[in-house]
Amino acid sequence: MTTAATSPSRRPRLPKGEGRQLRDQILAVAERMLLETGSQEAVSIRAVADAVGVTPPSIYRHFADKNDLIFEVCARHFSALDDHMARACAGVDDPVDKLAALGRAYIEFGVANPEPYRIMFMTRPDVAPQQYQGHVLAGSPSFDSLVQCVQDCIDAGRFRPGYTDAYGLSLGFWARVHGLTSLLMSKPGMPWPDDPDFLDQFTETCLYGVARHDR
Amino acid sequence: MTTAATSPSRRPRLPKGEGRQLRDQILAVAERMLLETGSQEAVSIRAVADAVGVTPPSIYRHFADKNDLIFEVCARHFSALDDHMARACAGVDDPVDKLAALGRAYIEFGVANPEPYRIMFMTRPDVAPQQYQGHVLAGSPSFDSLVQCVQDCIDAGRFRPGYTDAYGLSLGFWARVHGLTSLLMSKPGMPWPDDPDFLDQFTETCLYGVARHDR
DNA sequence: TCGATAACCTAACCTCGTTACGTTGGAGCA
DNA sequence: TGCTCCAACGTAACGAGGTTAGGTTATCGA
């Protein structure tokens, strides 16, 4: 059941100031394992050490513990989200449409990277290192662009009266979009619609709602 | 770090047909531990066995493995959700208001029981036993009442034209409400509003949206 | 009374995260 | 040139946890 490949010969020791090279190799191997296995538990310290060609204790020279390693892998991996979202809404002029495009891109990225997503946004807060407690996404370019887009909607008069707090509305929109992302990967056996426009409809409904405004 | 209390003396062996009593005791102890510690990992087979007054292998007479035990604990615990939601919307006549009340009750229950909620709805699908793969909530009284309430909204002409699939709309509403539930417990350090009406506003916005329907 | 069987226990295996501590080899300096 | 120091590892082991193979004992029915 072990993921560890048969150890690929002991790797030579690095020269004196070059210890960080091992750190990068550990991160690369751990990321590959996390994406291939889709399971945090399968990425054991021993398996990573074995794949890199090093003994388990050597990992601890570069990472405080396993959690520290796993979260840094995920944080690195998530840097691609910013690009993905930026590309998704490029060329979309209407601010509400742009908001929907951002939401769709977010869901796509999460579903495509389930285990990193689960680790970053679905684990108990006490297992996450201090630096990932709250403001992770809240300070990221992705969230910034979301807040900016919401502000554009407000400024363009596209939102209902009373909805003027761009930051709070962004939190709410994020929560709703996160809900589908989360459920899609946790309950793939649910009877989800197979309509290709499903994601667009979901994000748009997050914005326009389902209930009529008149009575 | 072990949660196991100092073993409370070996308990006497049960008479011949009464093995299920131990099963119930195991479930009760495991549920208590899960709620007290708020951590699935803290509920070890060894700790449960110790607290019950039995040896670890005896657990396996009644549960296939640890996951089987943990999920049954959560499923039992979630039976209280049906009552909670039924009470929440009792006396609410307007179907859309009732929908919002259901959503609020759901979030409240999830936030009040974070670890069971996380195990049931936020874990990898491959760790969940077969019986909890998809239709868990989809077949529960809670979800049934949600679908019925959505249908009432449709029948009363309270939804926008085109939104007629009660089951699909219920899935979407559940996903959105789950999103906030999930984020609230995973990222408590986020700058959530401390407005007491926050939950009501969130669920209502799930229904009415934020964007204007006219241009 | 006696065999069958349910209800356990003993002892152990294996994996995993983690730590204490030893080893080695090269960079820099006398 | 030789020596020292420290970064970059390795060795060995601890202890916790899930799980299993196989034994033991008490109770029930015949």
Image (spheres, coloured by chain):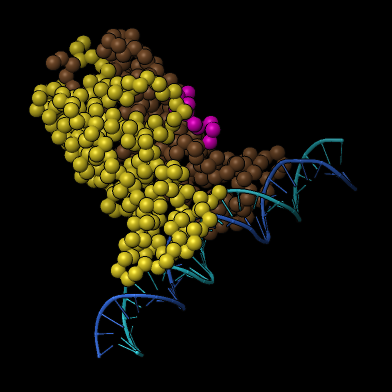
Chain colours: A yellow, B brown, C blue, D cyan
Residue under the point 42% across and 27% down: B83
Q: Position of residue B170 (x, y in %)?
A: 37, 21
**Looking at this view, is B81 or A135 the one in front?**
A135
Residue under the point 35% across and 19% down: B169
Q: Is residue B130 above or below residue A56?
A: above
Residue under the point 23% across and 24% down: A207
Q: Position of residue C24 (x, y in %)?
A: 43, 76
Residue B192 visible in the snapshot: no
Along the horizontal axis of the image, is B12 left or right of A125? right
User: In which image quadrant can residue B174 be found?
Assistant: top left
- Count of numbered labels shown in the rendering: 0
User: In which image quadrant can residue B25 be found?
Assistant: top right
Q: Is residue B94 above or below residue C14?
A: above
Residue under the point 30% across and 48% down: A76
Does the segment drawn in magenta span residue A183? no
Q: Position of residue A126 (x, y in %)?
A: 35, 50
Q: In which quadrant is the C terminus of chain A drawn?
A: top left
| Part of the protein shown in magenta | B129-139
Q: Is residue B19 above or below residue A215?
A: below
User: In which image quadrant can residue A89 be found?
Assistant: top left
Q: Position of residue A74 (x, y in %)?
A: 34, 47
Residue A137 visible in the snapshot: yes
**Looking at this view, is A188 or A129 the one in front?**
A188
